[in-house]
Amino acid sequence: MKGAHLLRTVTADSITQAVKKLCIDVNYYLTKDMYCALQEAVKKEESPLGREIIQTIVDNADFAGRENVPLCQDTGLTVVFADVGQDVRIEGGFEDAINKGVALGYTEGYLRKSSVNDPVFDRKNTLDNTPAIIHTRIVPGGKLKLRLAVKGAGSENMGGLKMLKPSDGPEGIIKFAVDTVKIAGSNPCPPVVVGIGIGGTMEKATLLAKESLLRPLDDVNPDPRYAKMEADILEKVNNTGIGPQGLGGRITAVAVKIEYFPTHIAQMPVAVNLNCHASRHAEIEL
């Protein structure tokens, strides 16, 4: 029919296969930007022990990639950010396809299954690392973009949320972010990446913080005010002396990323989410 709008079809099986591959790849292969950042950190670290630790992390990444084994025994929970184009028709169940991909990736990739069915009482392992945590939004266009991250408990447990007042200003945000890293200490396996979400509501800030960790390490915030805040926090974090694996040194973090969103006139929610040195994430377009 003239003027009819054609939808592009993406099959459930193609989603499953893509998610399966991403699950294995992010657990086996360190991202190029993090690998380069760690190599640079070896040169910058002033502590001999710190340099040795970072070099060991680099050597571990080399071994994992060469032997096709996980970078870390904690292969995390799977988090998927899905941008679904409004001109895309998904043939089959969307979330079922993602969860099937996670199950295949974790079983066929021999990855540790860490998901339990009930957070409080039963706590029985689901045996395939499902269900994934899925965040879906509808966007313009005819593409389906999947961004996948795995979050181990060591780093995820050390995040924080604070409902700051607008009068706390940038100084309050910086203090909360640095204090969160100090409290975390060695637990998130530094050197870390610090993700910060500002604005929205309580849950929006935490989502922004996690999503910020998907940015490339050399990606500077386009707003110069937030870019400066990222740099200031990174400097202060690296002045804490926590250092690699919490054993002292200069390189506690390799990057700080901030995402922000409009918020209510009477509030300023701030969330901090940390990635360990494995910083496992990847994306694909279908």
Image (spheres, rainbow, N blue to C red):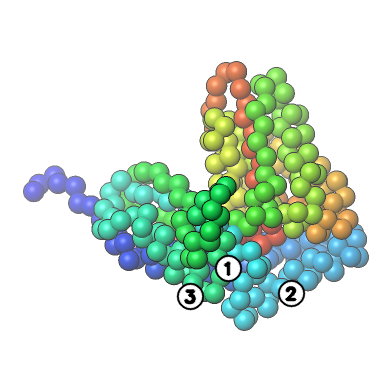
Q: Where is residue 145? Give x, y as percent.
A: 41, 55
| Cα separation between marks 1 and 2 | 21 Å
Left or right of residue 44, residue 201 in this image = left
User: Between residues 59 and 46, which one lies in front from this camera angle?
Assistant: 59
Residue pushed farthest left? 1
Mark 1, residue position: 112
Q: Position of residue 149 (x, y in %)?
A: 55, 57
* Camera-nearest label, 3 or 2: 3
Q: Amino acid at mark 1?
A: Arg
Categorize mark 3 by other alpha carbons within 10 Å: few (<14), some (14-19), many (20+): few
Residue beneath label 3, please? 108
Picture layout, residue 200 above or below residue 241? above
In front of the other: 234 or 180 = 180
Q: Who comes first in sequence, dot 3 or dot 2?
A: 2
Q: Nearer the viewer, residue 123 or 4?
A: 123
Give the labeled residue for mark 2: 59
Question: Within 10 angstroms of label 1, few (less than 14), some, or many (20 or more) residues?
Answer: some
Q: Secondary structure at mark 1?
A: loop
- Give SS at disc 2: helix
* Residue 112 visible: yes
Distance from disc 3 to disc 2, alpha carbons, whole Å, reads 25 Å
Q: Amino acid at mark 2?
A: Asp
Compared with 24, 93 (above or below) is: above
Task: Give the residue type that dot 3 points to.
Answer: Glu
